[in-house]
Amino acid sequence: MRIGTLGAARITPTALVRPARSVDGVRVTAVAARDRSRAEAFAAKHGIPTVHPDYESLVADPAIDAVYNPLPNALHAEWTLRALEAGKHVLCEKPFTSNAEQARAVAEAAEKSGLVVMEAFHYRYHPLMERALEIVRTELGEVRHVETWMCFPLPRFSDIRYSFELGGGALMDAGCYAVHCLRTLGPGEPDVVAAAALLHSPAVDRAMAADLRFPNGATGRVHASMWSGDLLKVAARVEGERGSLHITNFAAPQLFHRVTVTVDGVRRRERVPGEATYTYQLRAFRAAVQDGTTPLTPPSDSIANMTIIDDIYRRAGLPLRGAL
């Protein structure tokens, strides 16, 4: 499978280039960027043979099978749709689109095309999350509360992640993980009950907290931050009728993580070994493209995630990304 990458984003070496070296049958063969000299430097550094002058020519390249889309959030829908129109499979960085309406449009286009579109929630493909789900299903009893945190410091306020026009905000950048993890571990799709934001600018959140409720009556809470009192916390907690599960660093468990389980008053800790989350993700993308397997993060899942994000912004009194 030959992949072309749109742009030379900071995440690309970690999310695509290095994993491709260890995933059989995958090669990164093309790159394009707004600044051609930047694309050329990126290609030379990472051994990518083809540099395209612009995004249009990359998605039209008959020598590639798939496109990796790590562009700013506001460009995800546009260039995923263009890649589909050109007959390319797409691995799209999260958040999938600027809002749920755009996510539905991409999902419809993917369905009509018969091509694979997969959202890059890499953590979901690591064995840690499967082990967490097994613990929730078999040990905790009925789930009563799920809480997730994705908080990290980003004091560089000129960063595009603080730009409303480019689909920025703490809920979009950090919170998309927190929402997704809460939905993954929770008992069904939740509804948003309340939300409150700390603002960087009138339309852009630097932190967000939201309360949710699941169909069985269980409660949920999401914490997301790029600049707040919670400087660094990446965690998930599930409370059930028999006990609890706490995960430290669900997002990048290959670096470090901790799983603490308490059931019927007995506490234990576990570790789940594994490769980098991005390696598992790229294998899953290859399998979806080449073998027809269904990925864990298809467009239907992306619609559900973006719907929750939209509802949180509404509850917080903020405009949806891509809405103006």
Image (tube, helix red, strand yellow):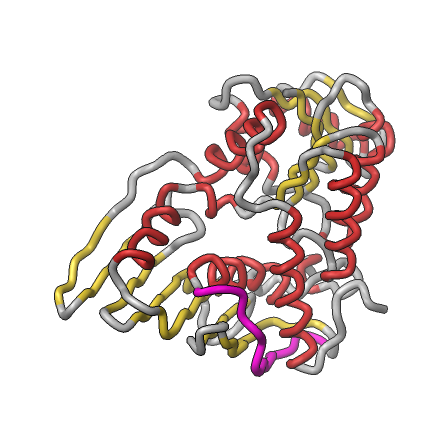
Location of the C terminus (image quadrant): bottom right
* Residue 164 % position (x, y): 76, 66
* In the image: residue 70, left or right of residue 150: right
Quarter of the view holding residue 101:
bottom right
Q: Residue at x 51, y 37 (%)?
A: 281
Q: Is residue 50 above or below residue 180?
A: above
Residue at 42 percent of width and 60 percent of height: 185
Nearest the viewer among 92 and 302 is 302
Where residue 36 appears, as percent x and y from the top left, is: 81, 31
- In magenta segment, residue 257: no
Horizontal relation, residue 144 to residue 315: left or right: left
With respect to residue 256, does 182 lie above or below?
below
User: What residue lies at 45% left-to-right and 66% top-to-bottom?
Assistant: 149
**Which quadrant holds the N terminus?**
top right
Q: Nearer the viewer, residue 114 or 231?
A: 114
Q: Residue at x 33, y 57 (%)?
A: 137
Indicate whether 104 appears above or below 236. above
Q: Residue furthest left?
A: 266
Position of residue 282 measured from the top left corner of the image (x, y, whole percent): 54, 32
Type of secondary structure dominating the magenta stretch: strand
| Residue 268, picture quadrant | bottom left
In the picture as drawn, the residue positioned furthest to the front comes out as: 216
Q: Number of callouts in the render?
A: 0
Q: Give the extent of the magenta segment.
A: 187-201
Residue 189 lies in the magenta-colored region: yes
Q: Which percent across, then down, holds residue 66?
A: 70, 28
Query: Is 220 on the left or on the right of 133, as rendered?
Result: right
Up-down relation of residue 312 to residue 159 (above or below): below
Q: Dividing the picture into quarters, in which one does residue 259 lie?
A: bottom left
